[in-house]
Amino acid sequence: MAGANDLPPLKLAFALYKYFPFGGLQRNMLAMALEAITRGHGVTIYCSAWQGECPEDIDLQVIPARGWDNAARMENFAADLGPKLKGHDLLVGFNKWPGLDLYYAADSCFSYKAHCERGFFYRLAPRTKAYLKLEQAVFAADSKTQILEVSRPERKRFVQCHGTAENRFHTLPPGIATNRVAPENWREIRRATRENLGLTGDQQCFLALGSGYKTKGLDRSISALHTLCEQGVDGVLLVVGDDKRESFVRQAQKLGLVERVRFLGGRDDVPNLLQAADVLLHPAYKENTGNALLEAMIAGLPVVASDVCGYAHYVRDGEMGAVITSPFNADDYVTAIVRALTVSGDQWHQKGKNFAATSDVYSRPQVAIDIMEKLADEKSASQCLN
């Protein structure tokens, strides 16, 4: 089967530094790869490490990492990747490297961070210089790389810092898996999952979903849980995702919450956990998008998130919880959680059902491959003219 524009099958190269099964960037990349394959295209994925199983239709090529630090390893990966790319129609990068045809912009603008949020000595560090160089290769005014953007507000920073032409940006809708939508038997799933987790009927279950505990504000949620418990709430916080947890375990120990903060690691049963929980907590310090917010909403789970999340407007517009305005206030956060608990689960599920049925938050992979097909066609036509 050819692509949507009746193109012959394409040979797509996807470059991602590391794949692990519970990362949002990784899940989005894999969804795009599978969508391309359903259209008859070939996909080769280049990475330095792959955790878990790889679908058999994907040609996986592992390029071993080399270098003393992360920045050096990223630069060396790009150098090692170049000679392997002959015969591909399009190179799509999920990290910032030179020579990309298309970049999936899941990360925020590093140049803005370095020049507007950090001091002089931060910019002198070799690591900072290396990352600025990699970002410049993608976003510089004279770069040919096209950009798949997931956050419109972040575009302004890239344009401000690099002079990137507006017509190089292609906006993607969210790409939430439809298996997050609450099924008709959600009550039975909720009861069974809570029993398996050892939760009693009257315990309030809070969910922190996603890797990157620090940037997603897990410390804020642990502190909020402590305040709620002091107010008489019998609460448990489930932390789902892979990351370093030592400092957060110490925080929970210091606050006497060892039994109430449970680190579950990466999980395959997220749809069930969304049904078991009472509120999703996502008070991020920085969040380009925030898929977890939408996953919770279509599951019928209220969300309390910070306004820095790119998808926070969905929560506000869908009236599916609360958005904490900046500067973040811990008391406002706790108050919003308590308010979410006063609304019944049936009411939240009805709101979530309406949102799931009327909002397009699922089509990112399809739109992304549409764009890749169009760019590959334009690239081929340009090469023929030259």
Image (cartoon, helix red, strand yellow):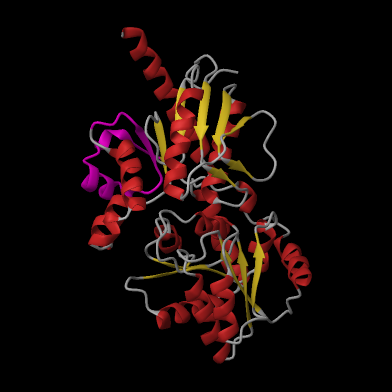
Residue 261: x %, y % from top left: 62, 76
Q: Quadrant of the N terminus?
A: top right
The picture quadrant where one finds residue 271 is: bottom right
Name above or below for residue 132 compared with residue 54: below
Residue 314: x %, y % from top left: 43, 57
Residue 341: x %, y % from top left: 56, 77
Q: Quadrant of the C terminus?
A: top left
Asked if residue 292 shows in the view, the reply is yes
Identify the residue at image location x=57%, y=79%.
250
Considering depth in this image, is 267 or 183 the residue closer to the camera?
267
Magenta segment, which residues? 142-171
Q: Residue furthest top?
A: 385
Name above or below for residue 60 compared with residue 28: above
Considering depth in this image, is 331 or 359 the residue closer to the camera?
331
Q: Residue furthest front?
A: 68
Q: Is residue 157 left or right of residue 243?
A: left
Q: Is residue 128 left or right of residue 75?
A: left
The picture quadrant where one finds residue 56 is: top right
Task: Determine if the magenta segment contains residue 161.
Answer: yes
Identify the residue at image location x=23%, y=61%.
120
